[in-house]
Image (tube, rainbow, N blue to C red):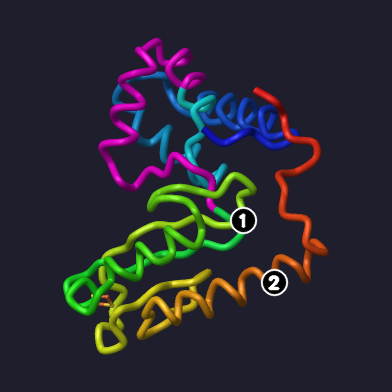
Amino acid sequence: MLQLLKGEKEEILACVKEVLGENSKTHENLVPILQQVQKKLGYLPALAMDKIAEGLQVPAVDIYGLATFYNQFRLNPPGKHEVKVCMGTACYMAGGDITLESFERRMEIKEGETSVDRYYSLDRVACVGCCTLAPVAVIDDEVEGKVTPTRVDGIMLALEEDREDNTGGNSGPGEGADHE
Ligand code: FES
C-alpha cells in the first residue's frame, strides 16, 4: 500500500467527515458516499474506507469488497502522469496487451497501480474511439496512436525528462511523507 503524503491523513479524515455529514448514514447510501469521497480525493484510500465503515457501522471488509467489485472505484491515487492503455477489441487485436506490458515493465508497476513516488499511474480503458490508430494509449488525456513498444520507450523518455525538468532529478517520495 502506498504511503500517505504529508497532510494527506488529515485531508482524508476531513473529507470523510464532511461527506458523512452530508448524507444519512444508511447502507443504501454507501455507494453514493464512496463516489463522493472518490470525487473529492481522486481515489478511495483505505483509511477513508475504514472511516466510512465506522460511520455506517458496517464491516470494513464489506466496503473493500464493494469498492473492488465496481471498477468505477480506484483504490490507488492517480499519478502525476496518468497513462491508460486501451484494451478495446481493435487495440487488443493490434497488440494492446503488449503495449500494456511494455508500460508495466518500464514503470515497474502493474496495471491498476501507482508508482511509489506517485509519478505514474497505469490503467486499462475501454475503446476511446480512435480505433484506426490502434494500439492506443491515453497519456494525461492526450491520445497517442500506434503505441508500439518502441513508442512506449519514447513516451517514457519524455515523461522522465519532464520529471527531471521539474525536480532536478529528485525522484524519491515526498520528504514529509507520513510513515504509517
Ligand atoms: S479499441 Fe482502442 S480506440 Fe477503439
The residue pinned by badge 1 equals: 119
Q: Quadrant of the C terminus?
A: top right
Horizontally, is 60 left or right of 135 in the view? right
| Extreme-bottom residue of the structure | 132
Q: Determine crowd level at label 2: few under 14, some 14-19, many 20+ residues with C-alpha closer than 10 A.
A: few
Left or right: 104 with respect to 81?
left
Residue 149 picture location, percent across and down:
39, 76
Q: Secondary structure at mark 2?
A: helix
**Image-quarter location of ligand 1:** bottom left
Mark 1 residue crowding within 10 angstroms, few (<14) / some (14–19) / many (20+): some
Which residue is at a point 62% across and 33% down the rendered structure image? Answer: 3
Disc 1 marks a residue whose amino acid type is Tyr
Magenta-drawn segment: 50-78
Residue 65 image offset from top left, x and y in percent: 29, 27
Q: For the residue labelled by badge 1, is the local secondary structure a helix, a strand or a loop? A: loop
60 and 100: which is toward the camera: 100
